[in-house]
Image (cartoon, rainbow, N blue to C red):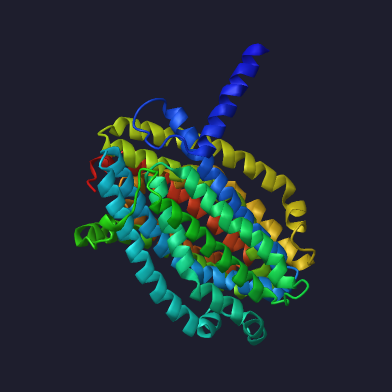
Amino acid sequence: MSGAISKFLRIFKLFIAALRGTESEFTSGSINRAIFLLSIPMIAEMVMESLFAVADVFFVSRVSVNAVATVGLTESVLMIIYSVAIGLSMATTAIVARRVGEKKFKKASDAGFQSIFLAVIIGALLGGVGYIFAEDILILMGGKPDLIAEGLGFTQIMLAGNLSIFLLFLNNAIFRGAGDAAIAMRALWLANGLNLILDPLLIFGWGPVPAYGVEGAAIATTLGRSIGVLYQVYHLMNKRGIIKIGWANVVIRFKTVVELLKISLGGMGQFLIESASWIFLVKVMSLFGAEALAGYTIAFRVIVFTILPSWGMSNAAATLVGQNLGASAPDRAEESVWKTAFYNMIFLGLVSVVFYLAAEPIIGIFTVEPGVVVIAVSALQIICFGYVFFAYGMVISQAFNGAGDTRTPLIVNFFVFWVIQIPLAYWLSVYLDWQANGVFFTIAFCHSLQAVISILLFRRGRWKTMMV
């Protein structure tokens, strides 16, 4: 009994150390310890992000079916912006982690500033375009006139405020590359915690605060994220961590900018390909009415609730690969990836069992509309069959990206999500009349295929030779 208590206390102390962020360089020592110290804050970070996604649709679903559908259409377009931000984040993590592994901390800070510079330019440009053409975007996505009348304000605010998304992603990529996952965690907890408070206040109103409806959700999200960015900036400039951005770093270094863009283009391409595919799937879902679209949106948010923590574990693999390649330890980098993928598989395997057995009560938390419930339940039960494969696919893809090899996942994503997924979804849903279930089956199949191909390519080891 005393041995079990002692083991529990050791794990608990390690858990607290992970949340505090007491270590930031992981090129030596126990790999399991390194995975734990990185994964815990990254998972906690993504749990809050996924809680935000679920809470957002929970409150919006109390407004109307059109409101939920508006969120679904807008989120599909925002996936393109997320893709650009994530692609740049991949490059940032890869370069910062490599410089940290090489013990070149000043150059790591230089790379961090260059990524922030790029984020401001790209985010501001996309925000202006998105605000001006918000109505046209909703029409293009298949939104009906009554949906656009109710949800245009939401779409305008979300697209105009995308700079906060860029900076939140990029700053956290800097912290992750430096191994300081705890600050990245606290930034998202602050941003999303504020959103959870502001969401019901601004959607439904209270006292002197008017009810903004679905538009209030956009205001809450943008405010929360902006305050999270301010928290990140404070830590980047306070001179206490590995990354210390000061006036000496505020110089445009074109060589670093070009390197960031070169690596990030592959990362952007990966997620642009996948996001464009998701937009097509939403377009297919819109053929079957607002209830199908709302059911798909709710199910997708529930899926995100479990995928994002899993993505957090995948981010840990990217940091470990980058730092260990920088320290000239490729075998340690590879071992870190396989162990992380195995732990991720156990987690998502358990989640898939829960989703299959309890899909209806889970969806019942968000809606009681019979038609919406049927669609959402089918989505959870079908898509969860691919979860075990998803686990490996996410980790392996992030391992490639952490090494700076964004080209390999780009090619895999193009082949799987465009060449196969798009025509397969349309064929099953429309021509074979599987309707929404055709989309759900395609998602499970294609993400599983992506995982298998990624594993086979990863085992070849070309990623170990990447120079960044």
Question: Residue sitting at 32 percent across and 58 percent down?
Answer: 113
Question: Residue sitting at 50 percent across and 69 percent down?
Answer: 78
Q: Position of residue 319 (x, y in %)?
A: 38, 42
Q: Position of residue 372 (x, y in %)?
A: 73, 66
Do we see residue 423 in this rendering? no
Q: Nearer the viewer, residue 331 or 208?
A: 208
Do we see residue 169 in this rendering? yes
Looking at the rendering, which quadrant does residue 57 occupy? bottom right
Quadrant the N terminus occupies: top right
Question: Residue sitting at 43 percent across and 80 percent down?
Answer: 129
Q: Position of residue 269 (x, y in %)?
A: 36, 62
In the picture, measured across the screen, residue 144 lies left or right of residue 17, that is: right
Q: Nearer the viewer, residue 222 or 267?
A: 222
Question: Residue sitting at 41 percent across and 50 percent down?
Answer: 238
In the picture, measured across the screen, residue 446 lies left or right of residue 206, that is: left
Is 376 drawn above or below residue 123 in the view shown?
Answer: above
Is 226 drawn above or below residue 320 in the view shown?
Answer: below
Q: Residue furthest left?
A: 255
In the picture, measured across the screen, residue 319 lies left or right of residue 140, that is: left
Q: Position of residue 193 (x, y in %)?
A: 62, 56
Is 246 drawn above or below residue 457 in the view shown?
Answer: below
Looking at the rendering, which quadrant does residue 223 occupy? bottom right
